[in-house]
Amino acid sequence: MRNTKLATAIGAAMLPGLAFAVPPQFGEWSVTGGDVDPCAALTNVETCEVMVFDSGFVQAQLKGTDGKTYIKSIVTDQDATGTPAGGDLAFYDENFVRITFSSQTSSVPGGAGSDPGFMGKQVILDTTTSSVTKFSSETEIRTGWGETELGGPNVAINTTIATIDGAGDPNGLFESVFDFQGNNDPDTGQQTGTRLNIDQNVSLSTDAATDDDRQVFAFRSRSGDLLNSNGVWGSSTDDATIDDPFDGIGGPESVPWVEGGTISAFWIGQNVATPGVGGGASEFFAIQVGPAFSQAGTGFPNTDGTALGGFQDWATDAELTEFGPPPTL
């Protein structure tokens, strides 16, 4: 590595009395002109010592308030300036491993081994105003001690792609969002829960500001320990009373879900201009929940997407809490 230096350049005494005995946290560092300070504003840490550094790169040894020793590695752009919390870094990768020092028991010098576990985070943020698109991606992984001692999802991925205007703001022509969380059992590695959101908003015209032609897609899925509610889709009161049901084979049907189980919902809506026909526009809507139950509607104006069985329930009660706001055209 160019101009790599081995050093005990920084030995920082933290304030353990103000921290908790849990592993160190992401995002507690800063960078100025590529010079990364991994010991800035730390919590849950007693000491921090830089081991290896170069432009846009650093490794430090931390002693946590939990009595454990960690190696913290950070990679960012060689000329970067800012902090992770400030949102002004185009790229960074941060990770932790935990090491356990062992005493010498033979003629082989005592060494160090790593505890089972890992914490890693990577962020890419491209918001260049001269570009026609905005891209952001954030991935976080926690395994072993990183999962059991800090909680939260085992894997979290969020990616957004959108077309933007000259100021760097989304212009409504295209936007796609992928958001995933997954939990694994730290002992067996078996998946214990998932949470998935996929959204896409596409203008069917080259000018989203003046044209209503649009297609919207939304998918939601929850399972296992990331489904933390009970509900009945097709009933605004979330009981056996059917309020806005789906059309079933034997009559109106609702779709129940229980905590720890599985529930998914899919919605697609489309509006297309039809000059001189049917009032000038044609709409299409469809919703599927379950996957056992679905309903669709199509036609010219006065076809109300929210009147589809189950869709108006998305905006109320357990459906809104579990899946967030419903999509709109």
Image (cartoon, rainbow, N blue to C red):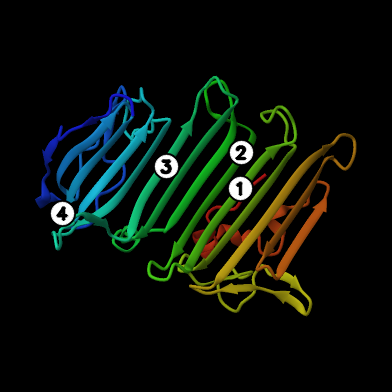
Q: Amino acid at mark 2?
A: Glu
User: What x and y, as percent, mark residue 302?
Assistant: 78, 50
Instruction: Report the mark closest to the observer, 1 or 4.
Output: 4
Q: Is residue 13 left or right of residue 168?
A: left
Element marked by disc 1: strand
Identify the disc placed on residue 175.
Answer: 2
Image quarter of residue 12: top left
Frontmost residue, 101 versus 250: 101
Q: Which residue is mark 3?
A: 122
Labelled pair 4, 2 in contact (Cβ < 8 Å): no
Question: Which quarter of the rendering shows the C terminus?
Answer: top right
Q: Is residue 289 left or right of residue 223?
A: right
Q: Is 299 placed above or below 162 here?
A: below
Q: Which residue is mark 1?
A: 199
User: What x and y, as percent, mark residue 80?
Assistant: 35, 25
Q: Earlier in the sequence, mark 2 or mark 3?
A: 3
User: What x and y, as percent, mark residue 162?
Assistant: 59, 34
Classed neighbour count for the residue bearing mark 3: other residues with Cα under 10 Å, few (<14), some (14–19), many (≥20): some
Q: Which residue is mark 4?
A: 65
Mark 1 to mark 3 CA distance (whole Å): 22 Å
Mark 1 to mark 4 CA distance (whole Å): 41 Å
Labelled pair 2, 3 in contact (Cβ < 8 Å): no
User: What x and y, as percent, mark residue 37?
Assistant: 23, 32
Residue at left 28%, top 61%?
Answer: 149
